[in-house]
Image (cartoon, helix red, strand yellow):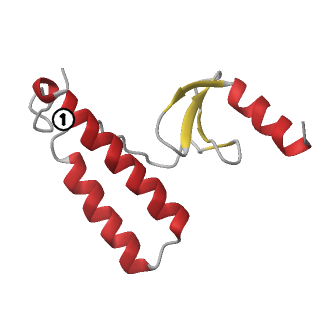
């Protein structure tokens, strides 16, 4: 196993839960950028969109267009395309769980 493969293997062994294609929660409950293993500072605001949010897919499509307009690379666009596909599949397969954001008022 190459050194890079070994490092990736060690990194993946501490993944407690994947958040998206680029981030995970580690065994210390930190949110980490999976590609380089660097934790996101707690002072940096974050947001999480769930697939059951019926506005998530349109939001992801709009974000993708912003990325295209800004000249983002194929890696970024591919990551967004994969997320859109996963969110669309979830929506098709879980119609009963889809909801308007905020309708449960955080409960």
User: Element at badge 1?
Assistant: helix
User: How far across and how far down the image is residue 8, in percent?
Assistant: 76, 38
Q: How many marks?
A: 1
**Quadrant the C terminus occupies:** top left
Percent x, y of residue 39: 64, 41
Tell me residue 60's x, y (percent): 29, 55
Q: Is residue 91 above or below residue 83?
A: above
Residue at image location 29% in from the left, 41% down from the top: 87
> Is residue 45 rendered to the left or right of residue 25?
left
Q: Quadrant of residue 23?
A: top right
Instruction: Give the residue displayed 23% in from the left and 47% down from the top.
Output: 56
Task: State left or right for residue 2 relative to residue 82.
Answer: right
Q: Residue at x 10, y 24 (%)?
A: 96
Above-or-below relation of 96 to 2? above
Pointer 1: residues within 10 angstroms few (<14), some, or many (20+)?
Answer: few
* Above or below, 94 relative to 41: above
Left or right of residue 3: residue 36: left
Residue 83 pos. (x, y %):
38, 47
The residue drawn where x is 21% and y is 29% is: 93
Pick the front one: 46 or 54: 54
Based on the displayed image, in which of its 4 quarters is residue 1 positioned? top right
* Above or below, 51 relative to 107: below
Which residue in the structure is indicated by mark 1? 92
Who is closer to the viewer here, 38 or 57?
57
Q: Residue 77 is drawn in which quadrant?
A: bottom left
Q: Nearer the viewer, residue 48 or 68?
A: 68
């Amino acid at each position: 196993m190459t050194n890079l493969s070994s490092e990736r293997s060690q990194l993946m062994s501490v993944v407690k839960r994947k958040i998206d294609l680029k981030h995970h929660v580690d065994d210390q409950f930190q949110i980490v950028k999976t590609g380089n293993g660097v934790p996101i500072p707690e002072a940096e605001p974050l947001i999480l969109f769930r697939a059951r949010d019926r506005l998530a897919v349109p939001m992801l499509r709009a974000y993708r267009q912003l990325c295209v307009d800004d000249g983002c690379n194929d890696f970024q666009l591919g990551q967004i395309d994969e997320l859109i596909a996963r969110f669309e599949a979830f929506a098709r397969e879980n119609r009963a769980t889809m909801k308007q954001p905020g309708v449960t008022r955080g409960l």
